Amino acid sequence: MELLIAGILLWSVTHLFPSVAGGTRDKLAGALGENLYRGLFSLDIVLAVILIVWGWKTATATAVYHPPFFGSPLIAGLMLIAFILFIASGASGNLKRFIRHPQMAGVIVWAIAHLLANGDSRSLVLFGGLGIWAILEILLINRRDGEWQKPEPVPISADGITVVIGFLAFAAVFYFHGTLFGVALI
């Protein structure tokens, strides 16, 4: 479990650093060069993912609570929303006019869905930890960036593309969940 916790902490600290210490980040990037800074940032993230995966596989899962919605269509619906939000962060759609941080909101919905479906200690650390990170990220970015400047409306077709791509990504992960993550959903 220690490796899983270390991975979540490394992921969180690395991502939160620019929001908490923007000036220090800029000085560090200036001293190292932007490309080297980004390379080290990426290396930290890769190391965090390795620790998370390795930690997940080696941690002993103990029951913490009985998951109230295991196998429920509610979980699938929440996951579809999470995928659409995640895709919307990189798309030019109207969703960004209503949700300032769709990617982080998608991570929060993803975390909630998994906590409703899994009640073991590993799940609590992984999904709870990343959900808390996403909430902190939103709060700190909002504090750093100030008032939200909502984007201008775009044609509704852009939203349709986002939903279709989000649905296709959801369907692929749903179908291959067993192969990718060891828990078959079908």
Image (spheres, rainbow, N blue to C red):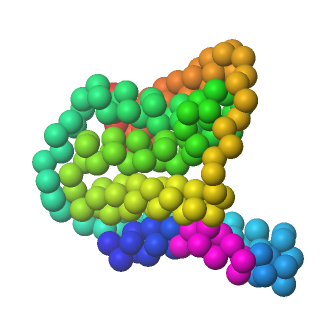
Residue 22 lies, in percent from the top left, at 69, 73
Range covered by the magenta-colored residues: 13-25
User: Is 171 drawn above or below residue 148 in the view shown?
Assistant: above
Decide whether the magenta segment is chiefly helix, strand or loop.
Answer: helix
Which residue is outermost to the front?
147
The total number of labels drawn is 0
Name the residue rendered at 59%, 72% in the picture: 20
Name the residue rendered at 63%, 64% in the picture: 144
Residue 44, picture quadrant:
bottom right
For this rendering, which residue is in front, 159 or 150? 150
Residue 126 visible: no
| Quadrant location of the N terminus in the rendered image | bottom left
For this rendering, which residue is in front, 107 or 20? 20
Residue 70 lies, in percent from the top left, at 22, 37
Q: Is residue 15 magenta?
A: yes
Residue 115 visible: yes
User: Is 15 drawn above or below residue 90 in the view shown?
Assistant: below
For this rendering, which residue is in front, 26 or 54? 26
Name the residue rendered at 58%, 43% in the picture: 100
Residue 125, picture quadrant:
bottom left
Q: Is residue 86 left or right of residue 40?
A: left
Residue 21 lies, in percent from the top left, at 64, 76
| Quadrant location of the C terminus in the rendered image | top left
Q: Is residue 133 left or right of residue 70?
A: right
Name the residue rendered at 21%, 52% in the picture: 119
For this rendering, which residue is in front, 37 or 1? 37
User: Is 178 drawn above or below residue 38 in the view shown?
Assistant: above
